Amino acid sequence: MGVVELNIRIRDFEKPWLFHVLADLEYPCILGIDFLGGSKIILDFDRKSLAIPDSQINKMVKKVEIEKVEIDLSKTKLEEKQKRELQDLFNSFTGLFSDKPGLTHVLYHEIDTGDNPPVVSRPYRYDMVKQEILDYHVDKMLKEGTIISIQSPYASPVVLRRKNNQLHTIG
C-alpha cells in the first residue's frame, strides 16, 4: 500500500525508520524485525524484555524539571562544604533517583557462570510470626514490581533481619 518514515522512540533511544504499510498478511511474521536487527535491539521472550545497547542510544542533553533530591547528610562526618558539594552532585542527576524502589528495563545484565552448576541453598526455617513478616515483605515487593516470580535452578534463602527501629526487613 505504501511506505512511511516514522521516528521510533523508547526512552532516550530514538531512530527514524521506514515502515511498509500492508493490507493483509497471509503468514505470521514479526513486523519490524529489520528495525530490531538494524538497531541491535535484543528481545528476551522469556523475561518479556527488550534491551538496547548503549552504543545505540544517542547521548542527548535534556532539560527536565524535577524536584531536588533530598538526602539527609546530618549523620555523616562531612564538612558543610562537602555536604553542599555532594548535595549539588545528587541534584545534577535527579533523573536517576526515585522515591519508589523497582526494576529497570533500560539495561539487561547477565552473569556468565560458564559450565558451573547452579548454586542451590536450602531455605531457612522461621517461626510462624517471622514467616508471616517474611510473607508480607515478599508480597509487597511482588506488588511493587521490585521482584518477579520465576522458575529457576538457582536458589538462595531469604534472610529476615531486625532494623534499628526493631522492625524486621528482608536483607
Image: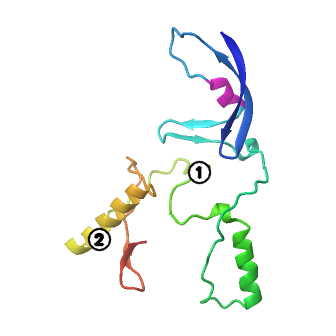
Q: Position of residue 12 (x, y in %)?
A: 70, 46
In the rendered image, which quarter is residue 119 located in?
bottom left
Colour setting: rainbow
Secondary structure under the numbered disc 2 in the rendered image: helix
Amino acid under disc 1 = His
Q: Which residue is mark 2?
A: 133
What range is drawn magenta here?
32-38
Mark 1–mark 2 distance (CA, rounded to whole Å): 30 Å
Return the residue nearer the eye: 135 or 90: 90
The residue beneath circle 1 is 109
Q: Which quadrant of the figure has residue 31?
A: top right
**Which residue corresponds to the image point at 76% horizontal and 80% vertical from the top-left?**
85
Query: Which amino acid, mark 2?
Result: Ile
Check if residue 34 falls in the magenta segment: yes
Please say whether residue 73 is one of the residues in the magenta stretch: no
Residue 125 makes an appearance in the image: no
